[in-house]
Image (cartoon, helix red, strand yellow):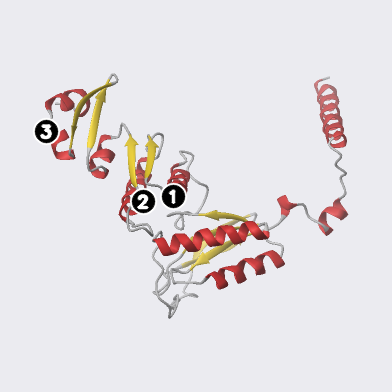
Amino acid sequence: MKITHIKKMAGWVAGLALLVSANAGEVVNLDQGFAQPPPSAHPWVFWMWLRVDTTPAAITKDLEEMHAKGIEGAILYDSGVGGHLEVSAKMVLDGKGYRAVKTADYAGSRIDPIDRPALESWTPHSRELVRFAAKEAGRLGIKLVVTVGLAGTSGPIAPEYGQQKLVDIAMAFMSEPDLVLLDEPCAGVNPSLVGGISSLLKQLNKTPRPDGRASSFVVIEHNMDFVMDLCHRIMVMVEGKVMAIGTPAEIRANKQVLDAYLGS
């Protein structure tokens, strides 16, 4: 009796799915789908800038080649060059899965250096190149993802979205603003990523814009260690009222702040 009920339910769900597809005007045709894949099935690529300087012409050439090959999107990040690769294992198929096996097959592997000037990340020149790449990608209909400090990520982004916050912060600075307001950038972030957010903000704050000035930021945050390490001047508020204003050293020595936030 239960099996019959499940079969009826499965038939009803399948019928509903077909009805929705028909109402949407979609026609299921596998042959056509393989011959002309929808955009959701188009490939993406990793677009690696090897920390050496490049040119707008080279960027356009890369993106036009991607467009010609049917690439839907590109993930842009920088990667180091030069030095040896330490590869002591390889993956082998074991039944339906893979396992690591020690090997000496790759002994002496290396990444050869490239004889070109270095491209420092997030300098005015590098930001201009990234903006140009985004403009060209838009012209060609290619989706572009720009990573910030994510080149070391292997696997899914942390559920706390700390990595995504790094990208959000960098995007906010891409327009070269005078002032950026940040509301609790460390909230819900894995502690291992807090240092990365602090380092990124320091770097962006020190990097001059084309006009010679650097962007400033105002941050609201409950993580006192983060604030003390990052900010030049701190305002402490309690119940909507200002308790103290000063340098990190002055705030650390303020008895009211110690009692209210840092502990006696």
Snapshot quadrant of residue 253: top left
Q: Position of residue 181 (x, y in %)?
A: 38, 38
Element on which disc 3 rests:
loop
Label 3 – label 1 distance at C-alpha? 33 Å
For badge 2, the amino acid type reads: Leu
- Up/down of 259 relative to 196, above or below: above
Q: How many discs mark residues in the rendered view? A: 3
Q: Is 5 on the left or on the right of 116, as rendered?
A: right
Instruction: Give the labeled residue for mark 2.
Output: 200
Q: Residue 14 carries which label?
A: none
Q: Residues within 10 Å of mark 2 (few under 14, many from 20)?
A: some
* Residue in the foreground of this view, choosing between 194 and 182: 182
For badge 3, the amino acid type reads: Ala
Element on which disc 2 rests:
helix
Q: Where is residue 228 in the image (x, y as percent from the top left)?
A: 23, 40
Residue pictured at 88% horizontal, 36% vertical = 22
Q: Is 205 on the left or on the right of 7, as rendered?
A: left
* Residue in the foreground of this view, choosing between 223 and 6: 223
Tell whether label 2 touches label 1 (CB within 8 Å): yes
Q: Which mark is residue 170?
A: 1
Instruction: Give the labeled residue for mark 3.
Output: 253
Q: How crowded is mark 1: few (under 14 residues within 10 Å), some or many (20 or more)?
A: some
Q: Is 255 on the left or on the right of 18, as rendered?
A: left
* Residue in the foreground of this view, choosing between 141 and 199: 141
Residue pictured at 33% horizontal, 38% vertical = 218
